[in-house]
Image (spheres, helix red, strand yellow):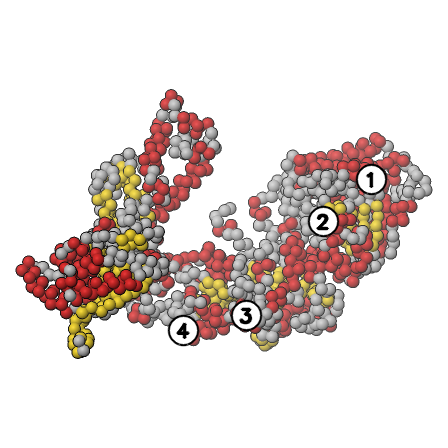
Amino acid sequence: MATKVHMEALSPTMEEGQIVQWLKGEGDEVSSGEVIAEIETDKATMELVARGDGVLLKILTQEGGTAPVGEVIAVIGSEDEDISDLVGGTGGGGDADDDGEDEESADASKEDDEDEDEGEDGDEDADKADASEDDDDADDDEDEASIPDPVKDVDRSDADEKKKEKKDDGDETRVKASPVARRLAEAEGIDLASLEGSGPGGRIVKADVETAVREGPAEKDEPAKAPDRRAPDEEEYEDVPLSQMRKTIARRLVESIGPVPHFFLTIDVDMGRIVEARERINRQLEKDGLKISYNDIVLKTTALALSRHPECNAHWGGDHIRRFNRVHLGVAVAIDDGLITPIVRDAERKGLVEIAQEVRELAGRAREKKLKPEEYTGASFSVSNLGMFGIEEFTAVINPPEAGILAVGAMEERAVVVDGEIVVRPRMKITMSCDHRVIDGAMGSAFLQTLKGILEEPLTAFV
Amino acid sequence: MTDTSTMSREAGKGDESMAGLEGFEKDQLKGFLKEMLLYRRFEEKAEEAYAIGKIGGFCHLHIGQEAVALGFIGPLRQDDYVITAYRDHTQALAKGVDPNGVMAELYGRDSGSARGKGGSMHIFDVEKGFMGGHGIVGAQVPLAAGLGFAIKYREEDRVCVCFMGDAAVNQGAFHEALNMAAIWKLPVLFVVENNEYGMGTAFSRVSALPVKERAAGLGVPAHHVNAQDILATWTLVEELLEKIRAGEGPQYVDARTYRFKGHSMSDPVSGTYRSKDEVESKVKQEDPISLLRDRLFDAEFLTEDELEEMDREVRAVVDEAAEFAEEAPFPAREELYNHVYSEVNEHGRLFFDGRDREGED
Amino acid sequence: MQTITYREALNQALDEEMERDDTVFLMGEEVAEYDGAYKVSKGLLEKFGDRRVVDSPIAELGFAGLGVGAAMGGLRPVIEFMTFNFSILALDQVINSAAKTFYMTGGQIPVPMVFRGPTGAALQLSAQHSQACETWYVHAPGIKLVTPGTPADAKGLLKAAIRDNDPVAFMEGELLYNVKGEVPDVDDGDFVIPLGKADVKREGSDVSIITHGKMVHVALQAAKKLEKDGVDAEVLDLRSLRPLDVEAILATVHKTNRVVYLEEGWPYAGIGAQIAATIQEEAFDYLDAPILRVTQADVPMPYAKNLEQMAKPDADRVVRACNRVLYRNGSAD
């Protein structure tokens, strides 16, 4: 009995996934629970496991290909199994739910063929189908009808065939090239996929192929033809395809900055005591090979401050505001093609060292795209720190449904007036973005005051 | 301007038995009867063939109006032109078009008078001067002016007779063409087959003036005639042709007639627009064929045996036409593209449907 | 060679053909005593008399139909429309009679005639007097359509059109009548250009501007501007739209791989739409870019000078379109 491999929803917000790699090839044995593919979701690279035993009979979505959640991307079955019905039935998400049914009907059609005349089986459906070929019911019995409808059936198989062909040579059609460029490339034996297109959207045009021909074995150094080519250093832009993650970031942030009424509060913090404290702590930790960063300290102090201001440690729920009693702190981590916010759970209860170790571990796995969904969803509040890039001050975009995020700037020595004297102090600016539906100015300010207080006088943490 | 209405009224006076027969030979009169009988039988055969699906599309029968065809075409010479609207079968026969060719055209066969490309509404025979069967109401009227223009341009002794239905006099083309025919004195006889209805609309409902008066403002002499009376019609037409050939310019006739059948085969004979009683009374009293037959009986020019023999002969012609049509070949496939252009230019493409590149034969 | 105006070239063609063939006559509004609304028929009444040069009433449907009838009767009428705008009144006779008679008669009755006059916009004549009528005519099988853009083409093609045995629509341009150009001398013999032969008005290798009629001049202006940018544009003048020189179209596509169609008329189902369809059907593998069309704005022609200018195709729009099919910088409209 064949099993369809669906594109599964591997993250809570995933709508489609891209096949990074098939770990099993067609013809390989697979067993239930075995990882058969890596899928890039909107957040991370996930593992897809087999939900049945047998042989991977057919891969329908090739590496690099994208499929919406629910679409059949492969079929597992027994070695000689006829899966033409299943392969034909690739389609929308609807298939995802009726796995079993489809399998049954596929079997049923086989049975019908074999024992046509066993009327005593009392298969009412089959009788009905025979009796009323053009009845609407016939649609339901399509797979079982022993006499195929010449019109409908022929059309469907044709369409399926075409669909299949399209998918099969999907790699080929992904190269965007003008017709004449294709023709020329074929004549010259040039692989279009090896060329960069200079036309709109990266379309490979005739001139690109001609250049490739010229700069190939012949190595002729003719000047480029004026009208349709530009020297590479004149390139105005580069079109980069969107990764799943970039798509999600774009969608979510637009959702945010659009409907979320942001306002911003900035506070300037004197970090003198923290600098001293960190030095002492790190000296102590040295023997254990450990170290804490300013960011770890900011996280810890933020968690503490939030625990005193639950009104800021909250989600906007559309028809309600959810205030969290515990602080699950999202920590923005820059990775190769985007950012992700792994979560330090119960941060207010954790020690600095624990936080430091956890953040480092999460960030490392984030960069490898190995985070599990639960490790990056469900933060109550987030912190973004661009201090290491020398950014003095910035605003961060709220990650809904969270109601606030801190943007932490670089710590730097600045001249400030203390007790009527100009002195040089290590200072750091923190900007809080607030969802005004949840947090009002005074509430946000109060929270920031608390935070500033702890950072400037760490002992107040114990008050 | 001759008002022929007095002529037809006068026809009822004097010796009953010879009423209106003066000036016609006995054989000529019997010939008229046989000719009109041929038209009638031909249309009846067409009706029958249409009913069993041998003829498709529109099919407009001339039953009841036979004297118009004979009266206006009979006096013509072979090289005179006739042009008409889509109720054109019997006018074609009257102009000498082979009944086999007309019937085969109705059947859509290659042996048809227009090679099966025209059909019922577009019978043509240029050899016989029959310039068609035209499908757009009134559109043939400027064409007739053009044929008249060509005759005059080449100083030929020919006439063009242009038939139209009563509805055509409300078309702009009618007025534009009659005006030009008048200013250039074109040799055209415009005949309005006034059967009282444009399809299902009584003429009196769509025109403030009667048919005859509609040409008055255009400078074309206008006449009217009882066109169920073949002899009155024939007499008038001979007179008008003489004027036209003498270079007097166009003439216009309101030929009063009646259609015994529906507008086309797909229309009822009577119904919302005219009553059954009206049709029955017209059929009984104004059938041009019965009227002539009775006058020939009255004058003892015709016996019942002769009439039956006449009918047998015309039926044989019609049956042969139907057999001919039945056996005639359909147009060959290559005929589809033949005759769109009369001159295929040395350069360039004329057809754009891509058939030549689809791999069809 | 003689250098004469487009108007004089047409006049010579009419004169020569009427001289050559007595069945040729000219009919239309103002063609005789007034010497023609645009003086194309100047002097012809005097030379040929009112039998052959005939002033018609203002009745386009009527005299167009009369022309068809005369052709059915064996003459070779040249029916002049003061402008093709007015010929919309005559379209029943053009489409239902002229175009179809030869077919409907099973090849018995040819209709050898010419409908001629200016098409397209002149200057500020507004909506009803400024429209390109090519599509309405070329759409119907049975009609041929010729659109000369230069004096030489006007003469050679009108003579061919008059001699052709099918109805030919011959579309001129009000703004072309004063255009001068070289035309072979009358003494050098019969100068006839066959229908269905396109003409490369400018050789080029980078992009093909395909066009017809008056727009040939706009295309040449555009080509000149493009030349300053280092773009070598080819201008192909179709001259006849039916029969259509498909070979010439394919040749220029094979050469440049990039096409802009320029026409005076509206875009929807316009001439360019047909040309683009033909190219993609028969030269798909030679295209390096999608085919673009430069047409009149898809609106009735406005009166106001500035709006009219915006509505008409001009050289700058052609240059932009060429740049776009060349994928060149700053070329987006």
Give the residue type that dot 4 points to.
Gly
Q: Chain of mark 3?
A: C
Residue C307, label in figure: 3
Check if mark 3 and mark 2 are on a common chain.
Answer: no
Q: Secondary structure at mark 1?
A: loop
- Residue C132 rendering spot, x and y as whole percentages: 58, 64
Mark nearest the camera among 3 and 2 is 3
Q: Secondary structure at mark 2?
A: loop
Q: Which residue is mark 2?
A: B85
Farthest residue in the bottom direction?
A421
Question: Residue at image x 40%, y 43%?
Answer: A159
Q: Which residue is mark 1?
A: B286
Question: Residue at image x 48%, y 71%?
Answer: C316
Q: Secondary structure at mark 3?
A: helix
Mark nearest the camera among 4 and 1 is 1
Give the residue type that dot 3 points to.
Leu
Mark closest to the chain's N terminus, 1 or 2:
2
Q: Is residue A198 left or right of residue B198?
A: left
Residue C230, label in figure: 4
